[in-house]
Amino acid sequence: MTWKARALGCAAFLASCVGCGAAEPAAEQPTAVEEAPEPPALAWLEALGRGDRARVDLARGVVFVTYASDASGEDPDADEDGTIRTARRLCGPELDAALTQLAADITRRVEDDVFGPMMACADATCSFPAMGEYDTTGDLGFEGGVLQTVVRIEGGPVGEEFRAEGARWADDATARLAGGRCE
């Protein structure tokens, strides 16, 4: 018999001897299962619509991004081609004002029979559609149950190319501002 055959035979014998001899006690297995972060839910949007700030970290602030056309030609944030591109972390009174406006926008949609049902949450984002010609969509990004970003892109009569460019610009802007805090 070769040494390999003997080793395999010994291994088989030892495996069949469960509970024989003075074996080491098995390591205790953890009983608690770490819970995955709760995915965002429409209830979170409705709570924000009521003015609830429980899912807002005031020390961190929230990144607000807007990409829209300047229909009036008078918006100071519009560039030379008439596109409003803003991205900034809002804190303090500026954050409070933006959250108040967001609450009104969400409430208007929740109460609407057509647009309310179009609100949805998936992965770490809750979204809602634009309600009219110069309105913007809303994508609210959450991390660990806390609101991190609000991205508004014009959803009215602009073309898909404009919306796609807005989405790319918003992705770049949120990446640039990620991880910051209020001062």
Image (cartoon, rainbow, N blue to C red):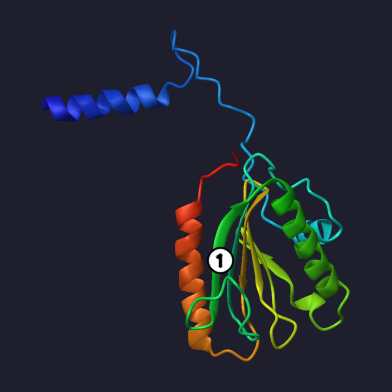
Image coordinates of residue 111 in percent, x first then y, are 88, 74
**For residue 72, side relative to residue 23 (left or right):** right
Q: Nearer the viewer, residue 75 or 45?
A: 75
Q: Please report the residue visible at 83 percent of the width from the left and 56 percent of the height from the top.
A: 47
Q: Which of 89 and 139 is in front in this view?
A: 89
Q: Residue furthest top?
A: 22
Q: Mark 1 points at which residue?
A: 86
| Position of the N terminus by quadrant | top left
**For residue 21, side relative to residue 115 (left or right):** left
Image coordinates of residue 153 in percent, x first then y, are 60, 75
Q: Badge 1 local density, few (<14 within 10 Å), some, or many (20+)? A: some
Q: Please report the residue visible at 53 percent of the width from the left and 44 percent of the height from the top.
A: 180
| Position of the C terminus by quadrant | top right
Residue 52 drawn above or below residue 80? above
Residue 72 drawn above or below residue 98? below
Image coordinates of residue 8 in percent, x first then y, are 24, 29
Q: Please report the residue visible at 55 percent of the width from the left and 21 percent of the height from the top.
A: 28
Quarter residue 5 falls in? top left
Q: Which amino acid does label 1 sit on?
A: Thr
Q: Please report the residue visible at 48 percent of the width from the left and 80 percent of the height from the top.
A: 80
SS for tag 1? strand
